[in-house]
Structure formats: structure tokens, C-alpha cells
Image: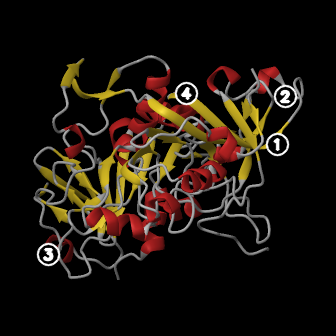
Amino acid sequence: MKKVYPDAAAALDGLLFDGMFIAAGGFGLGGIPELLIAALREAGTRNLTVASNNAGVDGFGLGVLLESRQVKKMISSYVGENAEFMRQYLSGELELEFNPQGTLAERMRAGGAGIPGFYTATGVGTVIAEGKEVKSFNGRDYVLETGIVADLSIVKAWKADPSGNLVFRKTARNFNPPAATCGKVCVAEVEEIVPLGALDPDSIHLPGIYVHRIVQGAHEKRIEQRTVRPRA
Amino acid sequence: MPWDRNQIAARAAQELQDGWYVNLGIGIPTLVANYIPEGISVTLQSENGMLGMGPFPYEGEEDPDLINAGKQTITELPQTAYFDSAQSFAMIRGGKIAMAILGAMEVAENGDLANWMIPGKLVKGMGGAMDLVAGVGRVVVVMDHTSKHGESKVLKSCTLPLTGKGVVSRIITNLGVLDVVPGGLKLVELADGVTEAELRAATEATLVN
């Protein structure tokens, strides 16, 4: 079965439906699946629930799907960079489920690993634990969180081989591996597809078993906070 | 004169011990990296997936694939390691990070911390703060002692939604250093030129001896 598709629209063909649940990789604008997000915008799929650490910025990343009102609900840990997000949320147009960042990452990892729930001390005694089971282990309280299984995962990697093995670059790895594993189907966009055998099998970050479709393309890779130091 | 932001950061840097893995929050905590004492080697964790965070890049050398948890461009060091977000929070939750230095909107005498949301007003999110305060060995808060309107941010109990319950060990403000102890807060140190009366006047929390 061929995993390589000619473009992002083709890579998503047949996978999209209104009301679906999507897990997306990326942290801020780092390592986001920008080509697949653009293709989702073009496809016009609506009432999406999206699990992603952040919600992009106005006009880029997941921000474009907020502007087009395709998102019904976000599951995120931090949305502070997006004015449109805040406007839709405060006016009640957009649902938001805040997850602590590590809880969100572990919910994805657990979902992909066949673990339906796990206990964590994160959020005990806060609004995050309200309505959830709390259990004591060795004298400390932990809250029960559930694994996430998404209809579709969209992720961004640096390199892939045709079998779907992925390699990420620096901090652009972030949520991409856990997000990839928690989808019933995972589509990965990459900067370069290299021939079989070109990746060192000992240095693969995510094995191809988790990756069903791959598309190569040029990435804008926008910088959110450009910080520099003076040359001495 | 109360301490300024850099002096608060410099004082917080005195908390660091050789060999520690440390997570610094956004704002004043980020400045702590500029004041790590001579002879002390600490490894900075950035919760988006990096150990061994280096300084900001020289102009023209920014890499969009290399950012910190505040989304700022940074650099790597010879000992740098990258990993995914699940691994990053496994080391946080697993207690491998010795200390987190974080900012706060409010802190209470029982160690409660609020730093992630103002209901109806500010919707940003907790990011990794809830995981950090629940998982790391020791939590030090750096903040201004009072709000812009002069109201104490060092309280008997927090009014804002909590980030963590009973998680703060030490508070470093522009007026001094306080420890969370049974029954309230204990004055450890006054900022240069600040009197105990001035600190007490700016503190709503119970001060104990």
C-alpha cells in the first residue's frame, strides 16, 4: 500500500466528515501541520473538535480554521496568542476544554497506546479535577484522566521515508509523536521524503506503523517571538 | 529601594544548586538564566521538548524549529537533548526536575498558587504550569508583592482559580523572600532598603516567626 500522496488535499481525501475529532501536533507555531490545516480550510469540514496544545495565531496555524468557523471545540493548554479565539470563546461561539499541557500530551500518548485512563497529580485541588474521580495512592491524591482517540491525526515532521518512518527536527517534535499515535488514521506532512534506507533505523523518532499517509511540501515555518542577542 | 525585575531574578538564581535540572517560567523567571552563579552548573528544561536550553541566537541565526516554551527563538548547547511533549512531561511528572521558578498572579500562605486565569477576563490557559507545580521537587515563585493598584498578591487565600494546591515552597518578591511554613509565611530576607514594616503592610497573608 502506497503511503505517499501528491498533495495535502489528496492526503486527506476520504478521511474528512463534519463533527469529526482531530488531534494536531505542534507547539505555538513550531512544528504545526500547516499544509494539512490549509487543506482542511479548503475542504470546509465543519463542527470540528480539535485537540492541539495551542490554537495558532490570527491568520496562521489553527487560527485559519477558527476564522472560517469550522471549529466547534478546542482541547488545548494555552490559547493566549489568538484574539479571534478569545473573541469567539468569550461570546460563547466556541467551546473550550483546557487541559494541562502534560495531561494533554499523556492523554494522546495513552490513547495511542491502548490505555483508556491514567491517574495524575496534575490539577488536583483545581477546577481541572472537578467532576473527575480522585484516588489516593501512598497518601497522595491523583485525578483520573482519559486517553484520547481521535478520528484523524495531522502532524508535521522533518523527514519521512516511503514506509512512514518519521524524523523530527529540534523542538518542532513537541506534540507531533503523541498526536500521531492517538489517531485512528494519521496523515503526516514533511519537508522531505527520502528513499527507503536513507534514514538510520536507530534514529527514527516515530515508526511508520503509526503513519498512514505522507505528503511532502514547502513550509512557511513562521516565527512567533523573534528574540536575538547582540553580537559581542 | 525594592528589588527590580532583574534583582528579583538574581536573588532567585541563588536558589539553584550544582547539577540541578530546572524549569524556568515565562517573564521574570526567564531572566534567572542571566544570573546563574559562577561554578554552578544547571541544565534548563523547556517543556516543549528540550533539555540544555542555550541563549537567544545572534541576529540572522534564528531557527523556527528551535523555540522555548515562551515561543521565543533560542539556541542549543553541546549537551542539548530533544524529545516529544509526552516524554517532557514524563520527566516533570516523574519528579526528575529539581526546581521550577514560576511567576504568579496570587500566592497564598498555605502554598496555593494562582497564575493561569482571570474568570471572564483573561482566557490564556495554564500551559504546563499545573504539571510543573504538581511534579517538580521544589516550586519557587517570583513576582511583584502587590498589584498595579497596590493590592497585596501575597494572600491568606487565593481568589483566582488555582494552578496548584499547597505547592509553593518559597516566594521571592520585590520586597523580600518568604517561606511557606505551618501556620503562614516566614520572613527569610528583606530586599535592600525595605523595612519589615513595609513588607508587612504589603502582605495580606499571616506572617509567623
Alpha carbons under labels 3 and 2: distance apart: 64 Å
Q: Which amino acid does label 4 sit on?
A: Thr
Q: In the image, which is nearer the foreground, mark 4 or mark 3?
A: 4
Q: Do the residues labelled 4 and 2 touch (CB within 8 Å)?
A: no
Alpha carbons under labels 4 and 3: distance apart: 54 Å
Q: Which of marks 4 and 2 is nearer the N terminus?
A: 4
Q: In the image, which is nearer the foreground, mark 2 or mark 1?
A: 1
Mark 3, secondary structure of its residue: helix
Give the position of the N terminus of chain A as an image quadrant: top right
Q: Nearer the viewer, residue A170 or B6?
A: A170
Q: Pointer 2 indicates a residue of which chain?
A: A
Q: How crowded is mark 4: few (under 14 residues within 10 Å), some or many (20 or more)?
A: many
Q: What residue type is labelled 3?
A: Ala
Tell me, for residue B201, which label it has, or none: 3
Marks 1 & 4 on one chain: yes
Mark 2, secondary structure of its residue: loop
How far from the left and from the top, in percent, is residue A50? 43, 45
Q: Do the residues labelled 1 and 4 touch (CB within 8 Å)?
A: no
Q: Pointer 1 indicates a residue of which chain?
A: A
Residue that label 4 marks: A181
Marks 1 & 3 on one chain: no
Asked whether residue B95 is in view, the answer is no
How far from the left and from the top, in percent, is residue B170? 31, 52
How far from the left and from the top, in percent, is residue B3? 38, 75
Alpha carbons under labels 1 and 3: distance apart: 62 Å
Q: In the image, which is nearer the foreground, mark 4 or mark 2?
A: 4
Residue that label 2 marks: A199
Q: Pointer 4 indicates a residue of which chain?
A: A
How far from the left and from the top, in percent, is residue B149? 21, 82
Residue that label 1 marks: A192
Q: In this view, does A62 lie above or below B87?
A: below
Alpha carbons under labels 4 and 2: distance apart: 20 Å
